[in-house]
Amino acid sequence: MSKKTAIILMFFILGIVLIFHFLILTEQIPYDRVWAGKLKSIEEMKAFEAFSIILNFFMLTVLYIKYRQLLKGINNKAVNILIWIFAGIFALNSVGNLFAESMIELILGTAFTLTSSILCFIIVKKEKTKAKAPNDV
């Protein structure tokens, strides 16, 4: 899979996740059914959801910058480090989703975060360079 394809898939996933969080924030989805059932009040839910929405917009912004860099054929170490951090956050979140009380969150949450972690890895992995043969000039 190409890095561009992985980024486009991440745009799609993060878009779905943002819609999900806005549905929780507007109480279309009950907050006691998410965050592994740990939220105890509307205020707590609003704080968690606001943080999550801001973090997702930040990730979208960083991935958009990376996408533009790929189109221009440039590479930025700081952007790559941030995406590596995203990969780690998604991997840890996958583990956390395994302890969710809701079966939907356990299955879908784990699938989304594990897939996101793998896609972030694809986006920042180094391309293998072909070794030059001794006769190559």
Image (cartoon, grey):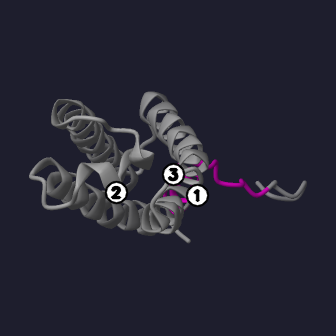
**Residue 61 screen position, x and y as percent:** 25, 43
- In the depicted structure, whether residue 99 falls above or below residue 42: below
Q: Residues within 10 Å of mark 1 (few under 14, many from 20)?
A: some
Q: Between 9 and 66, which is closer to the camera in this rendering?
A: 9
Residue contact at pointers 3 and 1, CB within 8 angstroms:
yes
**Label 3 residue SS:** helix
Which quadrant, please, contains the C terminus?
bottom right
**Residue 105 screen position, x and y as percent:** 44, 61
- In the depicted structure, whether residue 55 falls above or below residue 33: above
**Residue 11 screen position, x and y as percent:** 31, 60
Spatial CA distance of label 3 from label 1 is 5 Å
The residue indicated by pointer 2 is 71
Sequence order check, earlier mark of 2 and 1? 2
The residue indicated by pointer 1 is 118
**Label 1 residue SS:** helix
- In the depicted structure, whether residue 91 falls above or below residue 20: above
Sequence order check, earlier mark of 2 and 3? 2
Q: Residues within 10 Å of mark 2 (few under 14, many from 20)?
A: few
**Label 2 residue SS:** helix
Spatial CA distance of label 2 from label 1 is 21 Å
Residue type marked 2: Leu
Spatial CA distance of label 2 from label 3 is 17 Å
**Residue 39 screen position, x and y as percent:** 33, 38
Residue appearing at x 14%, y 47% in the figure: 25
Residue appearing at x 13%, y 54% in the figure: 27
Name of the residue lying farthest toward the front? 40
Rendered image: mark on residue 4 = none
Q: Which portion, as a residue range, is magenta?
A: 115-130
Rendered image: mark on residue 120 = 3
Residue 76 lies in quadrant: top left
